[in-house]
Amino acid sequence: MDTTEAEYRNLVEQQQDLIVKVSLEGRLEFVNTAYTELLGKSKDELCGSVFMPVTTEKYSDVIATQMTRLFRPPYTCIVEQWLQTTKGLRCISWSIRSILDGNNAPLSLVATGRDMTPLKNDQKAIRKRDEELLLLIESGPQMYYAHTPDHRTTFISPRIRQLLKCEKNTKKRSWTDYLTDNPVNAAGLERTLRAVSTGKREPPYRLEMEAGDKKRIWIEVNEIPVVKDGRTVAIVGSLIDITEKMHVDEGIEEAEILFKGVRPKEPKAAGRSPLRAIRSIFGRNEGAEEESV
């Protein structure tokens, strides 16, 4: 072994990353010290063994599909392998490259592995936290959303999808596609556009929307612009379904008009208006004594 080869071998042995050489038949031809220490086996035990042992047939098929890229340009691939090691079950990310002959035919494979278990655990913790946060915000009356300044939705509460009867194959891509032709919607859109242009919060407003089942619903919107470097980059907000409230208000208004039409000149009894009497009736507790109106 000449000096140059010894230097390269020493360099490989000092690496913290795992380095292996694999035959085209899938057997280990070389392993560095980091690999032997991780598996708790000697080089003699590992050399000749099958590279990338897998626990399930499904996982084996995925790896096999990825590794077919090693036999065509660019002759590289990246795969993940779960290994039982001296540190327990670890996720190793392998970057594999083919060693080619003069005719670009693969002769063997060289792979560099890195332990990705801490990152995987962090990702799992983040997913769990996101699920808990979503459960928390979904438990209240408000339903949350976010969209870009040009109305492209970036987040929408599952309850909003349920409210609007959103279907997977629907052609409606923007929340504005669900707006009806009610003139009140124009004022709401104007407030959203003003919030985007000024970066300042607008007062709450109401919209009438048509769900996927053609049912019309009313919502009250409370939103705020997200400003970065003096420019609005997103709109986030919450909405509440006020359809039932709107129906009650409309019924009270119609009742007031009816009372005025039937008895337009009758003075108020004891300073009470018919509308106030109706509200007192609907607001009376169960079991209360009847009140003469």
Image (cartoon, rainbow, N blue to C red):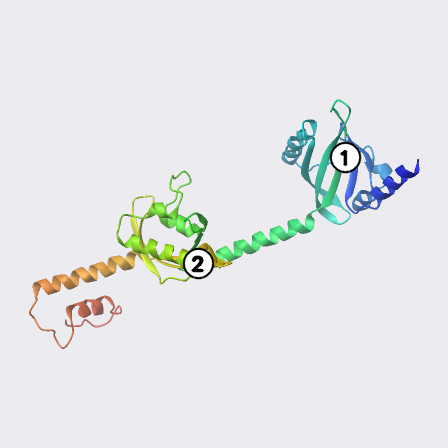
Query: Mark 2 sits on what residue?
Result: 225
Where residue 193 sits, quadrant-wise, is bottom left
Do callouts 1 and 2 mark residues in contact (Cβ within 8 Å)?
no
Residue at image position (26%, 52%) is: 183
Q: Residue furthest bottom?
A: 270
Badge 2 amino acid: Pro
Residue 145 screen position, x and y as percent:
43, 53
The answer, for residue 67, to whether it is visible in the render is: yes
In the rendered image, which residue does mark 1 sit on?
A: 110
Q: Residue at x 48, y 59 (%)?
A: 230
Residue 77 at what x, y percent from top left?
Answer: 68, 35
**Can you see residue 142?**
no
**Image quarter for residue 238?**
bottom left
Q: Image check: 157 left or right of 93?
A: left
Query: Exactly how many numbered labels are in the figure?
Result: 2
Residue type for callout 1: Val
Mark 2, residues whose alpha carbon is within 10 Å: few (<14), some, or many (≥20)?
many
- Residue 161, given in percent of the width and then of the height, sits at 40, 48
Q: Quadrant of the C terminus?
A: bottom left
Callout 1 secondary element: strand
Cα distance in 3D space between marks 1 and 2: 51 Å
**In the image, farthest residue toward the top:** 103
Q: Nearer the viewer, residue 157 or 140?
A: 157
Badge 1 crowding class, 10 Å Cα cut-off, few under 14, some 14 to 19, many 20 or more, is some
For the point 89% across and 38% down, the residue is: 4
* The one of 231 and 207 positioned closer to us in this rendering: 231
